[in-house]
Each structure stands twice: as structure tokens, then as C-alpha cells.
Amino acid sequence: MAHETDIPNKAYSPKEIEQKWLDLIIKSKKITSTSKNYFSISIPPPNVTGNLHLGHALNTTIQDILVKYNMLKKIDTLWTIGTDHAGIATQLLVERSLDLKKINTKFLSREDFLNYIWEWKNENGDKILDQLRRLGLSCSWDHIKFTLDENLSNSVNEAFIRLFDKGLIYREKTLVNWDPKLKTAISDLEVISKNKKTKLYYFKYFVDNTNEFIIVSTTRPETVFGDVAIAINPKDKKNKKYLGRKILSPFNNIELSVIEDEYADIKKGSGAVKITPGHDFNDYKVAKNHNLELINILNDDGTLNTNVPPDFQNLSTIDARDKVLDLMKQLNLYVEEEDIHNTIPTGDRSGAIIEPMLKDQWFVNVKEMAYKSVKAVRNGDIVFKPKFWENTFFEWMEKIQPWCISRQIIWGHRIPIWYSDDNKFVAAKNINEAKEKFKIKYGKEVSLKQDEDVLDTWFSSGLWPFSTLGWPEDTQDFRKYFPTSILVTGFDIIFFWVARMIMMSLELTNQVPFATVYIHNLIRDEKSQKMSKTRGNVVDPLDLISEFGTDSLRFFLASNISPHSDIKLSQNSLEPSRNFMNKIWNASKFVQMNSNIDRKKSIIKVDTFYDIWITSRFNELLSKYKSFLENCEVEKAAYVLYHFFWDEFCDWYIEIIKISFSKSETDDISNTKSIMNSVLYKFLNLLYPFAPFISIEIRNQLNFHQDTSLHFSDIPKPYEIKNEAKNVKHFKILQDSIIAIRSLRKNLSIPPGEKINCYYKTSPQSTKFIEKNPDLFLKLANLKSFKKFDDTSNVQLISNITSYGIISIEKKIEHDYIIQIKKLNKDLLSLQNIHDQSNKKLNNKGFLNSAPQEIVTKEKDRLDKSKEDINQIQNLLNQLS
RNA sequence: GGGCGCUUAGCUCAGCGGGAGAGCGCUUCCCUUACAAGGAAGAUGUCACAGGUUCAAAUCCUGUAGCGCCUACCA
């Protein structure tokens, strides 16, 4: 064993190389083509507070491969880049950092607070973009978008006003999801149901001040102050007698009536349910139907308000619950409690328990928009890949609720609604327009104030594919690149984002936002756990890049995409990709060392059987590669690149041409050198979208391209090949024979260094081919001689069978051929299995009648071949016994 | 509760109607001047289970079991 330190470093080291080419690779390249053909993507904008994680890396690598592939096709390509202002997340983050500086945001004016946030944004907002740049993405880096930029804000206002004018945006006082920690309304999507173990409590409520009582069960005793009724099911015989009777609430002396409603479930709890319409969505509906009043018992911060007895005021709901329970016990109203599993609504950003609260908020009526969106997907105007995601999309769209879009925070697009003192309002882009509109609508000029709230961040994200292109202005970009070609994103934001983009786009532009939605999966750790800071299992892509190189990371991601399962990342996941880069690096070194040819002079003639073979294999690669990428099958394209290069170009082609290079230069040899260079160069073109850094470096080291300031810019043409079939078959003879000899050598424990005599027995055509290329066989199998076996010769043999004939070596006394006998027996067994299967099929009339002719022919050939091989192998075994 | 997906080699996953595949790991041999991050030769599977459709099923259909994800107001 040599020590590692003794060996000069031959491995590919990506670091300097990637630095060297980064600028060139990310430099956006404008193709000025008059063709209407285009390829455009709008990136899922990362949060401005974001930090690069593997999800971004996967998502952008997929997009970049598609973009670079289309650039190779010389198609006019646009990939917009930018960030999302991430309203709540950003505001929270800046709040916290101000808190550290002892600045209390409660005492800041809106303007001052906003200034602080902008300051933060200007200092830190490019971090995620700088990190993304390191991946070598071909985005339009010179036109970075931000959802709060003037143009995009203009789109938001325009969208709001148009939807408002169509009556699709409206204001309503209703129950909303209220985050008491953030003190804002949030949409139903931002509420996460968490399963928790809680208790169900049973209480007595006395009827009409008698001794009769009804038992009511609840998980939220603290809401007793908001109760307005007790509901029972119409079919509930047990409780029916209480109908219409009055119950005096023991807590605030409010009279509760016992009402009948289908909502009450006989099987749940006691069958009687208290109705708290101020803080429960179901109860709210019941109350509406029965014209019940509504009591709000909570302050905006979630504590109990002045509608509850003084002792309970300003308590948190949790404290209030304990206190109510105590009181219940004191009053002898407490019956029992039961452990149950319950789902608790929590805020996705704050983690706080979400309270239904009665509030005035802005909503989008999305019902009709959702219907149109479903239609667009159903009739194929938009296609999901993989298709099964369409079901998820339909399911949500079909039960979609009005979208609450107003948020009581300051970082975001301020709602373009202007109020008069008497609460009349108009929607307008600015104060002047508002005044004009107000005058037209109400006939008077008054002072107006803009709504204090801002819009849900997803409202602006929903416009992203066209707002980034300049909509509503009739810009060149919008005309040229919209609808975008494809959206690449994770399944986790199908509802948040994809669905809303489709709805907004159809409503506002009358076009789909993209033709295809490509949904990819998540990256998890090796135990298949989600990566999260709390688990501490987050892998930083930048760490992977410094350890393995960007190209390795990209190639790893590209080759591990899987429609059905998440990508699992472990310690050595990137090794295969790194090894592949190293292989490419070293093979290129070989090409370089053997490229003493004049490239300009050499005319490529595909002549020798191995040149024909490798170019034929390349053509196959090329056609698969193209069809895979046209279908967004990135992982399959990566697979064929890998196996072409490693298994075919390196393991066979290079090994063979080495042998001819060791001879004195002939025309054939310099021709082969040209082919070798050409195949490598064409391969690099195809590799470029996957591994841009190493591709460009090798291209320039080998002087494949005179102008080093250029990207790769071609999809290579296939080779024109003559006599392909015959020569490919010859190549197969060579391969099979070599493998058979090596196998024999191994089974007989003949050292690799020992030259041996070898024999073959095959058809006249194959014989002719072998005789023409003796040295290839001698060198590749390390033989002393390779001769045609003559039955009359008096040599004893040990043999292997190949698809083209028999390969044998001389039997010697020292050979222990037990292993070889075992191998031949194994071959025999599998041949017999094939034989029996084929025989059975061909004796089956159903098969002969129903199967396609080509399958039947194939089966006959298979049977014949297996018969022949079985005979051969039995002979070979006889020789050894 | 509703929906979706998965179950194939020791591990991670392709294949999705006509001969069971890849990468890693494993066994044996080899530092052969492109590459030991390498080369060569190998071993390894009732394709979850049960029915059905078909001349033919890992592949299509139905059911069962287990796993995962999404979704839902359970007082």
C-alpha cells in the first residue's frame, strides 16, 4: 500500500475552478432572436429573510438545467430571479433585532418602523441571492425583482382594484382566524392543526332554576362567558324535554335557550353542546341560523376582556380555564373529565393558539376563480407533473373558502382603500385618484385616509409570474415571455402559491400563468426526517459545495429526483457524483495527453469499428438525453450521461484506443484522436446544464473553443455513421470475448500479470473480424496468443461460452477448475430455465395466436439459441470431467 | 373522517404489460503512466400479501396489511 502522501494529487479539486468560471456562467446571455419561440420561468421567489437550504438548491438546479438546456437549443430564454418580502416573517425578524437594541417597536411610528425594516432589507436582503449565485444559475441577475419594488407594488394595486371593481374583493365583519400573538388575522391556510392530548369536561347546567339539569361537555371551559345557547340534536330523545326551556348561565347571568340543531351530535359528549358563536366557527353558523347574539370575550392579545366577570378579566385563556374549573367545582356543577385527543389550531409563524374572532377584514371571493382554475387544469391548459398532484389541487379547489387577505401588520402592500370619516370608501392607487373616485361616487370632496392594513404576502406572490414581467403595463417582456413555460416548485406550496397564481392569472390576464407545473419533493436526512433547526439536522448546501464542489451537488440533486419519494441525504450521498466529476476530469486528462493532432486539419472519418461503436453510443445518448429533457425527466438524463461516459467512453473506448495509440502514428490513429476529442466535446455540451463548471474548464483546457468568454451554445449534432450494425456487432464480439477470458482467468486463479494462450471457436465472419484485430484481444486480455481452435489439435481446454462462440484456454495440471465447473453449471441452469420457459410459451396456442409476431419470432430465436448453448455447455463440461 | 403516495438486492431507489436493474455496500484479485474518488471478475431478489384480467403481470384491476404525506370544525 502506498501512502497517500506519496502520490501526487490527481483528484479533481473543484474549488479554484469554480471560482474561476462563476462570473461567466451566471452572466446572463441575451439571445437576440426574432423567433416567437421562447422558454421562460419565474423562480419561486425565496423569502428575503431566507437562508439557502437544500430545498432551494434542488429547486433551482432543476430550473437551471432546463434553462441551460434551452440556451443550448438557442431558444430565447428568460429566468426571472428575485425575492419575496415575506410580511410576517420579516417584520418579526426585524422586531427581534430591534428588541436586542432595546428599541421597542410599540412606540415607533409606522414610518419609523418601516424605515428600520427597509434598512434591514437593504443590508441583508441580498444574502439569499448571493448564496444562490454560487450554484451557477443562469438567471437574469441584472434584473432582480422584489415584491415591494415600485413596479410590482403597482401590479398589486392594479390587481386589487380590478378585483374590487369586479366585486371579487369585499369587506366583511365575520369570524376570522386571529393570531393573538401577532395580533393579526391570518388565512385558513396559515392555520396548522396540531394533535394534542387534552381533556373533555362535563358540566351540569340547571334548567329554569329547578333541580333538573342538562349535562354539557366542552374542551374549552373558559369560553363559558361567551355562551349564548345550548344545542341538542332534533333526534335526541333523551334531551328533548329541555327544548325551549331557559338556562341561566351561572357565570354571567345570561339566559341560554336550549335549541334544536343538526349540528349537535348525539354521540358526542353528552349530546348537548354549548354554543359560543364569538369563538367557534361552527357555533357561529348555528347562531346565525337561530338569530342568536354573539359575545366577544377576548382582547386582541388573547386575554379575556371586559365582557367577563372582573375576576376573570385580563387572564390568559389557560389561566381562565383553571379558574372556571375551580368555580365549577365550587358551584357543584362539575361532573367529570375525560382524556381525549383534540386538534388545536396554531399559527404557522407564531405557534400561538389561533382564536376565532369577530373582525372586519378584506376577503377575496375565490369560488368562481377556483372553478376556472380547475377547468384550466382539467382541459390540459395547465399540466401537473407528476400528474397525481392534480388530485390534490382539485380537492382543495373544490372546497375552497373565501381568502382573508388583510393583515394587521405594516410590512407589506398597504391596502389601496381610502376611507372618509363616515366610513365610505373607494379603491384607488393613490390619494389623488382616491379623491377623484370618491367625488364621482359620492358627489363630494372630503379628506380621505388609507386603510391601515397590508395585504397577505401571498397576494403579491400570486401575481409574480406576470408582475415580474411588467404587467399591467404592456411591456416587451410580458408580450414575449408570458405565459411562462414551466413552474418548478415543491408540493408544500401548491395551495399557498400555485393555486393562487393560477386563479389570479386567469382572472387578471385571461391566460394561464404557466403551461406546466413541475412538482418536486423534499430533501430529508438519512433517517428520513425533515431537516429542521430544532432537530439540528440541517445540512447547509454551501458546506456541501466546499466539501464536494458545486457540480457534484448539482449532479447529485439532478440524479436523485424522484416523483414518489423524498430525497434522503446522508454523509456519503454526494460521493458518487464527486467520483463522477473526478472520472470526467481524469478521462479528459487522458484525452489531453493524447491530442497531438492538428484539430483544424483533421477531417473526422468514422472508420474503425470502435470509433463507429462509440459514435453510435453517443448518438443513442444524445437522442435519449433530448427526449428526457423535453419531458423534464432530469434524473433520467443524468443517468444516461453517467453511464455513457463511465461505462462506455471510459471503460471500453478509452481502454481500446490506448492500444492503438501505443503504436506509431497512422491516419487511422489521428482520426481516432479526432473522434475521441469530438465525442468528449459533444459530451461536455450535454453535461454543461448539469455540471457547468467542470464542463467549461475542460473545454478551455482542451482548447475546444477559441472564445473563452462564451457559454456552451450548441446541442451537438449526431454523427453520421456507415455500416453501424455490422461494426457494433464486431464490438460486441470483442467485449464478450474479453469478458469471457477475464472470467476464466479469475475462476482458475491465473494472476492478471501472467500471459496465457487462448483459443476461440466462432463463425467465419466473426473469425475474420478477430483475425483482423489480434492485438486488441492480446492486450485487453493480456494474452500470449489468441488462436482459432482447430478440432484436430491435441490440446485440452477449459472454456467459456459467449453469445458469439466459445472461448478457451489450455488446461494445465495446476489449474483447479472446480470454480469454473460451478460457473458453467450455473450458466447451464439458467439456460435450461430460459429453454423451458420458451418451450412452454411456444407450445401455448394462445400465445401463438395472440402475441405480436415479433414477440413470437423473438421467442423462437430464444429457444433455438438456448438449445444450442445448452449443447455447447454440456460439451464444455464433459471436457472437464 | 376524506384524499394521495409507497412496499423491488443488506441500504437508497429506478423500472410500470413480453428475458429482474442502478448507485452504495459485500466477496476475490490488481498501485496496469487518465483516474485507488480507480480497474477486473463476481455473489445477492417467492418484485408486501390474496384474488382477478390477459396468451403473457413487478408492471393493469379489486381487496388486505404495513409505512409515509396532505387535509378536516369533532363539542
Image (cartoon, rainbow, N blue to C red):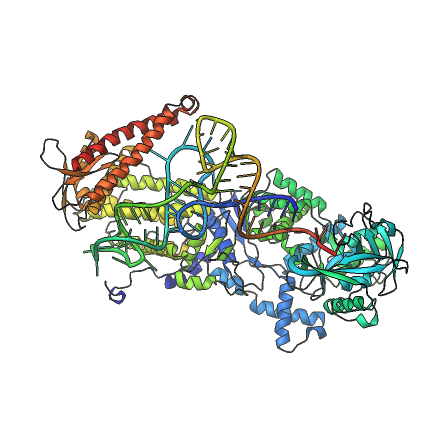
Q: Nearer the viewer, residue A9 or A143?
A: A9
In this view, A265 is above or below A807? below
Q: Quadrant of the C terminus of chain A?
A: top left
Q: Find residue A752 and report its horizontal and vertical position in percent.
A: 19, 50
Residue furthest bottom in the image: A102
Image point (38%, 26%), residue name: A841
Q: Find residue A96 and report its horizontal and vertical position in percent.
A: 63, 72
Q: Name the side, left or right, on which A711 lies relative to A597.
A: right
Q: Name the side, left or right, on which A111 lies relative to A638.
A: right
Q: Quadrant of the N terminus of chain A?
A: bottom left
In this view, A15 is above or below A832? below
Answer yes or no: is residue A472 visible: no
Q: Nearer the viewer, residue A59 or A142?
A: A59
Image point (38%, 63%), residue name: A15
**Quarter-wise, where is residue A809 in the image?**
top left
Q: Find residue A202 and report its horizontal and vertical position in percent.
A: 77, 59
Q: Nearer the viewer, residue A503 or A803?
A: A803
